[in-house]
Amino acid sequence: MTSGRLRIVALVAAHDEEDTIGETAEALRRLPLAEVVVVDDGSADATSSAALAAGATVLRIPRRVGKGGAMEGAIARLPPADVWLFADADLGRSAEGLGSVLDVVVSGRADMAVAMFPPQGGGGMGTVKRASSTAIRLLSRFQPEAPLSGQRAITASCLAAVRPLAGGFGVETAMTIDAVRAGFRVVEIPVPGLTHRATGRTLRGFAHRGRQGVHIAGAAVLRAARLR
């Protein structure tokens, strides 16, 4: 990987992730990055302490604002970067595999590269994923295989075109739609060994996916209105 003089920053939005954020931050720090920043979105546990112990810079939000809002607020507060690497807090040691996604953008082969997880059990029924994929296809003509993946490398110019980031869990769907419609090159990259915590078919899991669906629908409706 050749980063040259580029300033590359990893940004992780985390809420109550004390069990995984340390390993995730440590894994990201093994990549050629200037900084790993964890934005603690109103956690009630030791997420901030675990991230600090792992060597990350921590920005703490006292009251939860949601994933997209936390990311947008952090980007507004941080010094500019040439390339950003977004990652979820629950990747653990597998986060180091995002080097291949980062390399695609750093080398100039894409403006935004999205990591694709290997097949993984324990998830839901795919309803929210299909809804996100359909929205992206209808509004941008791009057919994604990993529409909900939060693991993304993105250039500063592409990021500027998709800001302000959509709120909550609609951030990934909106980011892809906006980037493609603005003419940027978006690719998806399989990352062997990449893992995260599956929400499962529990009451909590269904509630999480329900919130995802609402946020995605809101982001899609707003972008559909802009086409009129």
Image (tube, rainbow, N blue to C red):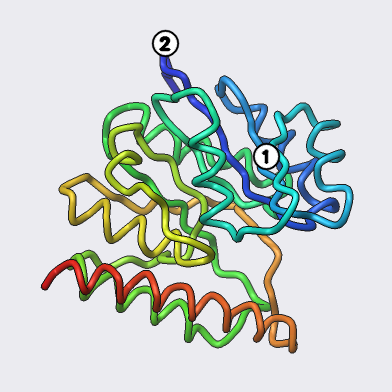
Real-space Cα separation, disc 2 to disc 1, in angstroms:
23 Å
Dot 1 amino acid type:
Val
Image coordinates of residue 155 in percent, x first then y, are 35, 34
Q: Is residue 183 above or below residue 30?
A: below
Helix, strand or loop under label 1: strand
Q: Residue furthest top?
A: 5
Q: Is residue 169 above or below residue 183?
A: below
What residue is rendered at 40% in x and 81% in y? 130
Residue 193: numbered disc: none
Quadrant occupied by the C terminus: bottom left
What residue is rendered at 22% in x and 73% in y? 224
| Residue 22 located left or right of residue 208 | right
Q: Is residue 102 above or below residue 115?
A: above
Helix, strand or loop under label 2: loop
Dot 2 amino acid type:
Arg
Q: Residue furthest left?
A: 228
* Residue at which label 1 appears: 38
Viewer-proximal residue among 42 and 11: 42
* Residue at which label 2 appears: 5
Mark 2 and mark 1 lie on one chain; the one further toward the N terminus is 2
Q: Quadrant of residue 96?
A: top right
Q: Estimate how packed mark 2 is, as few (under 14), some (14 to 19) or many (20 or more) residues with alpha carbons within 10 Å.
A: few
What residue is rendered at 68% in x and 78% in y? 122
Q: Residue furthest front?
A: 63
Viewer-proximal residue among 166 and 53: 166
Quadrant occupied by the N terminus: top left
Eye-nearest disc, 2 or 1 = 1
